[in-house]
Amino acid sequence: MYSIMKIPLLFCTVLLVFFPNKGTLHAQPSAPGGDENFEKVYLSDAYQEQQSFRDSLFLWQENVRLHTDKSIFLPGEVLFFKADILTGPEQLRVSASEVLKVEFLDKEGVLLMSQFLRIENGMSYGSIEIPRKIDQGHYYLRAYTRWMLNYGPDVLATKEVFITNKRSQSKFNLADVVLRPESGSLIDQLPSQVMVYHKYTSLQQTPVVDSKGRIVTRINDFGRGIGRFLLTPSKDEAYYIMIEEDVLIPLPEVKAKGYTIQTNNLNPDKALIRVEASEQLLKKAVTLNGKRKGQTIFKKEIEFENNSWEQIEIPKNELAEGILELTIEDLSGQVWASRPMQIEQNELQIKVERTTASAGNEIYKVQVLDFLGNPVETELSVSLVEERDAALSGRSAIRDLQEGINSRNQRFIDDMLLLTGQSDEHQNYINANQIPDEITYTFQQGLEFYGQAYDLNNSLLTNTEIQMLITAGEEAYAIETKTNPNGMFKISGMQIDGEAHIIFRTPGEETEEKLVKVVPYEYEIPPLKLSENALIKPKNRKGSDPEMPQRSMQDFSSESESEKLIELDQVTLVATRELQKVTPSRFDLRATRVIEQDLDRPKTLPQLFLNIPGVQVVGLGTLTPRIFIPRAAQLGPLLWVIDGFPLNQTTRLVDVMNLLSFVDVERIELLIGAEASVYGSRAAGGVILIYTRTGSDIDYLERKDAEVQFRGFQESLDFKEYVENKKSKRIAEHVPNTLYWNPQLKTNSNGEAVINLSQSSNNSPISVTIKANTENGLKGNTISFFK
């Protein structure tokens, strides 16, 4: 247990006052969809009574809906994002959790950076600066609450972004193209819609040719790299998309028989599904199945009577919101065709119109209506992006959809994004029958610190009072806690902004003697789930040691805590650094010849050198012993370095013996050849590094072992200030440029909001992306294009 108080920074060096602990409170709001007053109640009663964990997990399931300002970035740019936290079966924008963790990972699942954000009114927003030195490729922004870890990696919101190091259009890359027949396959003589996606290049009117080079159809491009074409293929023919005369992209091989699925999902109340079969399969018994995460939601037998096709009408009000996988299966369970379909309930209508003010500024008027046409007062996340692809300006398909996309057109675009794998919408909500049997992770109401304490001699501090002084900006916090029999302790509920520094010590007046070494621990990184079958195992932060110590959450519990803590043994925390037993090597060098002083029976310097391989001591026992290194003989004098300070190269062993006492020596390292290159030409004859207990040990312990940098809540950059202070104004030809970002644009009582924007000088198409999630569970999004 611990106590905490906030003190003025001015007095933090002389005043340490500790208040008695009142106990740790765990709180959550009343059930979503119940009382409109979102009041907090203590969870401890529910836990002590051991009520149905599964019911709690079902009713309190949290999901995150992410919105980024764009999806393609240059190194050094800032990624802005908004996260709406939706709770319960009705997906209300409320949250019992008050902390959101945001991670930036590479495609191998390596954590590159992370931050914690406050959740207020079910919303959170922030920014991440893309490193200036980063490889080109795909990266992932992931956001989740600790409570969401109860449901596994499938539910963690993940958004893919692409980092490009090239400011100008690069040569066409086939790997950037996504081709997807609507039913997953091309079937002989059955018409099929084929969806196409490419990051950079407009594919408008790009020809589709057969093996003889004859044009059979052309691609219609709808903006954002999305296009489609209709094709009735023949089995004995091969088809290609002709990007250029010498660049052909092959379509999937045409199958001799099969089924196709075509959907019309534009009606808000029902979905129309058309299933067509090859002539050879008209009498075969098959079913249309709707599945979600492997669970069958509906099944309908299909009988082809007088036609080769059958149309099925699916009422949307009978289906839960989310992504359905439609499949055609025979009696043996073989899947003949499949395609995803998005089911949306209570969808908001978001309208966007553009006008030009007298001053030349562009004005975008936004209106939000519910499904009955009533105005909605809410908060929106809005991005206006300048699409810097010159080919975009000629897209007739964009003009057909721009100037205020209606909800039908929006569903059409969303469906193409879903089919090509570019949709931001992922099925993160799990059904009641997939709920885990137990609660492993609690709701998080504040930041936490987990640590294991040692004294300066690396002895574990068990059942010991620890004092912590936390400085963050102009504020300071004094905390007192006590380690358990494992030497471990935890602090929870901290409300710290920005980066903080924590000094650890035991009560007492002499700082050097009372300093405490602490090994911090943090939650292990969850696996990166990219698709149903792609689970990338968790990895540590880039550059960290994968063999760091691991501890169970139970190891940090104190005897005074409730025996019914719901953190179980399977919750693992990983150390963020190893216990440093000695002063670190200069320049982080790894010497191969090292000898450490025996603190109980210290040896003289000549005796220590006798135990270093490759070193000879001449005149041992005399008043003027000297060092001889055969390998470096005739190459130059030795360079002596004491606690990082090089001595004159005329220095001899006897001079060093007169300079310091052998009892103060911690260790000696010898560097020869390439190991010594960091010291330049002075190191031709070798380098002898001597580390003393008094010279650097205490200073190092004070700065490193006894001090920990702690990351508090991260504050988002202000977008307007970022744009004004942006160093690089150079235009990247193919990289979208964010002109406007606002994660908290509020509509008035008429459901209206206005955006003023300086007119773009590049005359490029502008895309307007808006997302909305209301407190009562209404959701909506729109992508509008303006030329």
Image (cartoon, rainbow, N blue to C red):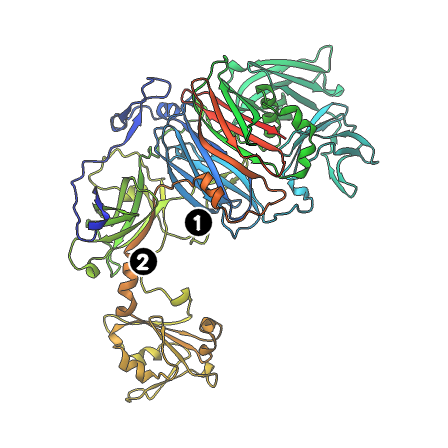
Q: Earlier in the sequence, mark 2 or mark 1?
A: 1
Question: Which residue corresponds to the image point at 27% horizontal and 49% vertical from the top-left?
Answer: 471
Camera-nearest label, 2 or 1: 2
The kind of secondary structure element at disc 1 is: loop
Is 17 left or right of 542, judged from the image as shown? left
Instruction: Please say if 779 is above or below 570.
Output: above
Q: Is residue 114 visible?
A: yes
Instruction: Please say if 98 is above or below 78.
Output: above
Instruction: For the C terminus, give its image quadrant.
Output: top right
The residue carrying pointer 2 sits among few (fewer than 14), some (14 to 19) or many (20 or more) residues within 10 Å by Cα, namely some
Amino acid type, label 1: Arg
Q: Is residue 156 visible?
A: no
Q: Residue furthest front?
A: 358
Instruction: For the N terminus, give its image quadrant.
Output: top left
Is 4 left or right of 744, judged from the image as shown? left
The residue carrying pointer 1 sits among few (fewer than 14), some (14 to 19) or many (20 or more) residues within 10 Å by Cα, namely some
Q: Which residue is mark 1?
A: 541
The kind of secondary structure element at disc 2 is: helix
Question: Which residue corresponds to the image point at 36% horizontal and 39% vertical from the top-left?
Answer: 570
Name the foreground residue: 640 vs 236. Answer: 640
Name the foreground residue: 728 vs 464. Answer: 728
Name the foreground residue: 61 vs 415. Answer: 415
Instruction: Please say if 420 is above or below 248.
Output: above
Q: Which residue is mark 2?
A: 704
Give percent across and percent down for residue 629.
42, 82
